[in-house]
Amino acid sequence: MALRRKLLIGSLCGAASIAALAFGLVSADRAFPPPIHVADTVSKEVLDRNGRLLRAFATPDGYWRLKTTAADVDPQFIRMLVAYEDRRFREHSGIDPLAVLRAAGQFITSGHIVSGASTLSMQVARLIEPRDNRSILAKLRQMARAVQLERRLSKDQILDLYLTLAPYGGNLEGVRAASLAWFGKEPKRLTVAEAALLVALPQLPEKRRPDRHRAAAEEARGRVLARMAVSQVIGEGEAERASAEAVPDRRRQLPAYAAHLSELALRKDPAAASHRTTLDRSVQDGLEAVAREAAQRLGPKVSIAMVMADARTGAILGEVGSADYFDGSRAGWIDMTRIRRSPGSALKPFIYGLAFEEGLVAQETIVEDRPADFSGYRPRNFDMTYQGDVSVRKALQMSLNVPAVRLLDAVGPTRLMVRFRRAEVRPVLPPGETPGLAIGLGGLGITLRDLTQLYAALANRGMPVKLGDGIGEAPSIIDGDPLLDPVAVWQVSDVLSGVIPPTGSRRLGIAYKTGTSYGYRDAWSVGYDGRHVLGVWVGRADNGAVPGLTGYGSAAPILFEAFARSGLAIVALPGAPRGAVRIAQSELPASLRRFSATANGLVSAFARESAPHIVYPPEGAHVELGATTGEAISPLVLKLQGGRAPFRWLANGKVLPDAARRRTTQWLPEGAGFSTLTVIDAAGRAASVRVFIE
């Protein structure tokens, strides 16, 4: 009985001791948790629209540490890593007893450490809590931390910590940073040789750095390959071929695209670890390469900026703020896409678009290019010569100044500025000035982004789009009236698509316009196809003059090269909308054969001719509006020239709703067949045409 009582008491004491020990361990575990939070400090990343890395920023302590998960890495690498470092990773609870017994036996028989018993969990414990020595006490603490990690995290989470924190030499940490630095690519797809090197480096990262200790790196990689062949993770032939592959001999720079936009993203949301942009890295790469090369050709202090966007959505696909962000001689840190500069002749297409829309001119209308005086304003052409009588088409293609000012005088500078506001673009006039004729030749300030936004409307059939900022601000279609009507947009695009490419550039099927500001300070070129728009600015950030700098000679070649190297397929320009035609000069009505304007802005074929004349549709025209196909009938645009406002329109004797002061209006036919259209001006003079609606 006494013996039984002693055994019972002993058992209770033992159980109590075990319980107390367990309680103590649990309490210690809670009181001293592993510092997993250190893995939260990773490099901030800026990504493109497809999730590809544009730029990474070092951590506050100066390390390139990119957050990495097993999904980011080639599965072959994971298999090789586990097979080499911790074959029973999925079975143990942080400590591998078999590996511990093996290491202990080797230590006893040899008197020194032959091989370690570290599991991947123990290695992660060392990474989150580095140790200065390899003492037994440090190893025991590492084991305890490994058990703690296993209690808190899944195996996959522990593996992700290793992939993020493993050292790879210098200030490289994690598999993604290492793969980008040593191989110049993400670790999604690695060769067997690349995977083996990444397995080998973390054991002795400094002594095996390929750029400094190539032989040691090759030897370590070879041991990994040999063991993988023995373990049948890879075949012997595969290991042999991988051994023959060269080890990288230099460390590459991590991706550093879109420097200005990346900095802006961090300023907007400093706490975010990842920033998604609308950029396309392939487009960005092509644009930046073109900018760097062009800046070298153009000489010192010259910078280049570019904006490429999807004209249908307003999404920024590529943006270059300067030729080289880190080039102090070019003030590369200044984002020139957002600086207001004089656009020179780059706004002329919108003047011509208004003139087309108002029915004042056609492409083959003759306009004078001779010295002219507009109430003291005397514009001159860039080359100080004059062409005499030229067609409107040629005047725009040659970017002649006097014809553009003549048309702006007729349509009105204020109206042009109002149209810009439809696209949510507000150029800045000199202090205290109101819109005058000088705005047609660059007498205002506008940013490259805003100029590109204006041209996006031309690529989008006249409908303006709001360009996003590439990061947080979403692009959008702007509700409201079009910048220009589709017929006028087509006329402008048809003219600009016929401009000869700059010397050395091949035709790409784009429409484009150039501009040069006063004093050779700014060179511009903006071009578009049926989907994309690209704006280019060239100049000095300090607004200094660059002798010989011109839009056609300096900016246009960059535009064509950037379009070609963007990687985007050229989309055909939109076809002609209903009512858009190019008429030969000999077939134009008398009022459109020659343009001239009176002092009060009324336009006529000759100064004395003031009777109204219907410009469109012409007499006897067959106009297809869908009336005979069962489609919804489209409205017909009516245009007149001459006469005195207001005007009254009649269709088949029925008065259209409102008198108008504008020289364009719309009429919705009731059906197919012949119709008679009549306009009566304020003086009672009338003009009529008979057309057939299809």
Image (spheres, rainbow, N blue to C red):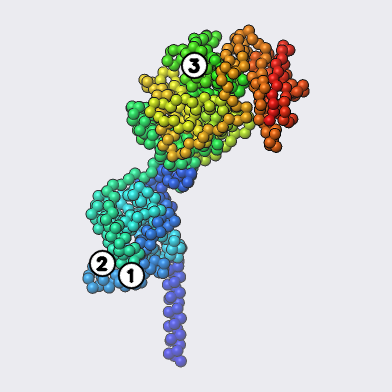
Q: CA distance from mark 3 to mark 1?
A: 85 Å
Residues at marks 1 and 2 touching, judged by CB atoms closer than 8 Å: no
From what the image shows, is residue 565 above or below residue 162? above
Q: Splitting the image into 4 quarters, where does residue 131 fall?
A: bottom left
Taking the image as drawn, is residue 456 in sight? Answer: yes
Which residue appears at 63% of the width and 31% of the height?
480
Residue at 52% x, 40% y is 472
Amino acid type indicated by mark 1: Ala
Camera-side residue of 215 and 145? 215
Instruction: Give 426 or 510, whichever is nearer the viewer.
Output: 510
What element does badge 1 sit on?
Answer: helix
Residue 186 located left or right of residue 357: left
Earlier along the polypeptide chain: callout 3 or callout 2? Answer: 2
**Label located before the other in sequence (3 or 1):** 1
Q: Do labels 3 and 2 touch, CB within 8 Å?
A: no
- Which residue is under mark 1? 99
> Mark 3 or mark 1, which is nearer to you?
3
Q: Which residue is mark 3?
A: 401
State the separation of the CA atoms marked 1 and 2.
Answer: 13 Å
Q: Residue furthest bottom?
A: 1
